[in-house]
């Protein structure tokens, strides 16, 4: 399991970048929490990009995936607020602005993701 912060500071970013990334992190967290609540209420929910290769998952697996993704989003929020945001949790290298703008909750660089 990864830790919420690291000894290194967050990657440099403008106040506007920080605000936009935090807003996107919060929106994704709300989306995932809502899907989790709907699933627990017995509704069938689509996991979209959370799904694995588009394969259907039973309710229990969907709940596990949603909980794990929500933990990832919450970790990104903590790292943004407490330090260590924007670094790969595997190798420690700075993540690209493109990765952080696209998915501000990303945990690994492209190289580690491909490995």
Image (spheres, helix red, strand yellow):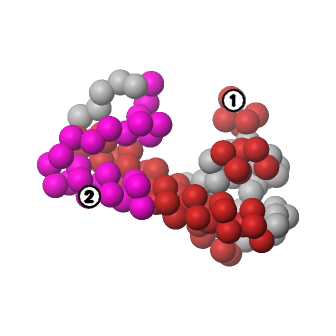
Residue 65 image-quadrant placement: top left
The residue located at (65%, 60%) in the rendering is 21
Which disc, if any, is residue 19?
none
Asked if the magenta segment contains residue 35, the reply would be: yes
Q: Position of residue 70 (x, y in %)?
A: 44, 56
Relative height, residue 66 to residue 75 (above, below): above
The residue located at (35%, 24%) in the rendering is 55
Residue 30 image-quadrant placement: bottom left
Pointer 2 or 1: first along the chain: 2
Relative height, residue 43 to residue 28 (above, below): above
In this view, the residue farthest toward the left is 42
Q: Quadrant of the C terminus?
A: top right
Which residue position is annotated with label 1? 115
Q: Which residues are magenta?
A: 30-53
Of tags 2 and 1, the one toward the viewer is 2
The residue located at (73%, 71%) in the rendering is 83
Q: Position of residue 109 (x, y in %)?
A: 73, 42
Which residue position is annotated with label 2? 37
Q: Is residue 62 left or right of residue 80?
A: left
Q: Position of residue 10 (x, y in %)?
A: 78, 66
Q: Secondary structure at mark 1?
A: loop
Answer whether residue 6 is visible to the viewer in this image.
Answer: no
Q: Secondary structure at mark 2?
A: helix
Q: Position of residue 113 (x, y in %)?
A: 67, 35
The residue located at (40%, 25%) in the rendering is 54
Pointer 1 local density, CA inside 10 Å: few below 14, some 14–19, many at least 20? few
- As measured in the structure, the alpha-carbon distance from the residue carrying label 2 to the one carrying label 1 is 33 Å
Q: Is residue 64 left or right of residue 50?
A: left
Answer whether residue 85 is visible to the viewer in this image.
Answer: yes
The number of discs equals: 2
Q: Do callouts 2 and 1 mark residues in contact (Cβ within 8 Å)?
A: no
Asked if the magenta segment contains residue 39, the reply would be: yes
């Amino acid at each position: 399991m990864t830790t919420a912060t690291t000894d290194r500071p967050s990657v440099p970013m403008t106040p506007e970048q920080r605000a936009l990334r935090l807003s996107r992190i919060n929106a994704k967290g709300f989306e995932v929490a809502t899907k989790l609540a709907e699933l627990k209420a017995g509704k069938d929910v689509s996991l979209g990009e959370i799904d694995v290769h588009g394969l259907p998952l039973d309710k229990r697996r969907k709940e596990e995936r949603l909980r794990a993704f929500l933990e990832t989003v919450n970790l990104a929020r903590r790292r943004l607020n407490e330090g260590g945001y924007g670094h790969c949790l595997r190798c420690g290298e700075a993540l690209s602005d493109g990765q952080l703008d696209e998915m501000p909750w990303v945990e690994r660089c492209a190289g580690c993701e491909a490995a």
